[in-house]
Image: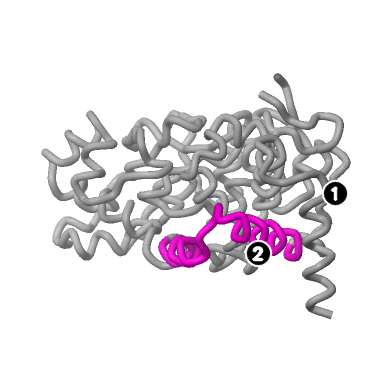
Amino acid sequence: MNGIADLGGRHGMGPIKFEENEPIFHAEWERRMFAMFILAFAGGHFNIDQFRYGMEQMAPAEYLTSDYYQHWMHSLEIWCRANGTFAEGEVERRMAELAKEAA
Amino acid sequence: MTTDHDHHHDHSHRSTDVSLRVKAIESLLVEKKLLDVEAVDKLIDLYEHKIGPRNGARVVAKAWTDPEYKARLLKDGTSAIAELGYSGVQGEDMVVLENTPDVHNMVVCTLCSCYPWPTLGLPPNWYKAAPYRSRAVIDPRGVLEEFGTAISSDVEVRVWDSNAELRYLVLPMRPAGTEGMSEEQLVELVTRDSMIGVGFPVQP
């Protein structure tokens, strides 16, 4: 399947963006997302092929413009919904609750 | 495989929402007893502070100073690397590519971000982003120039596309003038980029 993730040979993606002294993670949410993925993977929620397939389900424009760990988040959510861990809209409801608590 | 095809393209994870969204996911997984917060913290510490390109540098420096180790490394990368204690997730099957005066190797993952975690740690952003992934396979010399890495036109450039099962580590050439240096001193010369094949070791 020639999906958006199949980037080898595509043109027009621009120059490589280097970052001097790049940190391992760029934000706290990246740290948490990274570790959640590893633990969900280790816990058998999905295998590596399913995980990549989940990332490849992102809309092409979103795939290219989002931060890397957002790809992981997208896939984790897909599999958590597919296996019934998250009900439809459950993440959004929790986001609203957390936003309210923080306000 | 069941995924909600009708639904998932509707999600828009705008960056302003991402932090909150990740918090919500974590909080739900913890509440459902599917995630241990302490394990999350331990893993973050491990990959932020303990696993990184210094591991790979030790492999390279040993190969530079111990011909028998180098032979084992090129024959069976996974077990030779494990001799130094580096193994596990995203390094289960390792192939070591030796740079020579005639061949320069460089590594990419065009489909995603496959990278040898036990020896190099987590990849830099440029490795996971579209410009490098798209161009490394059609214009490797142009990409190398962008890194400031000049490869003579009479040297063959080989590009290796990683995948979920197989990971590569480049064994760069030992810099000239380092004959008197110890293995420990050589470790300091081995850069992350030289083990991806987009750079050279530090010339002392």
Most extreme residue toward the bottom is A103
Q: Main secondary structure of the magenta part?
A: helix
- Depth order, front residue of B156/A34: A34
Q: Chain ID for label 2?
A: A
The residue furthest top is A1
Q: Residues within 10 Å of mark 1 (few under 14, many from 20)?
A: some
B189 and A70: which is toward the camera: A70
In the figure, residue B188 lies in which quadrant?
bottom left
Instruction: Determine whether the residue tagged by mark 1 lies in a helix, strand or loop.
Output: loop
| Left or right of residue A25, residue B51 in this image | left
Can residue B101 be seen here?
Answer: no
Is A12 drawn above or below residue B26 in the view shown? above
Chain part drawn in magenta: B19-46
Q: Which residue is mark 2?
A: A29
Q: Is residue B178 left or right of residue A45?
A: left
Comparing B120 with A77, the one in front is A77
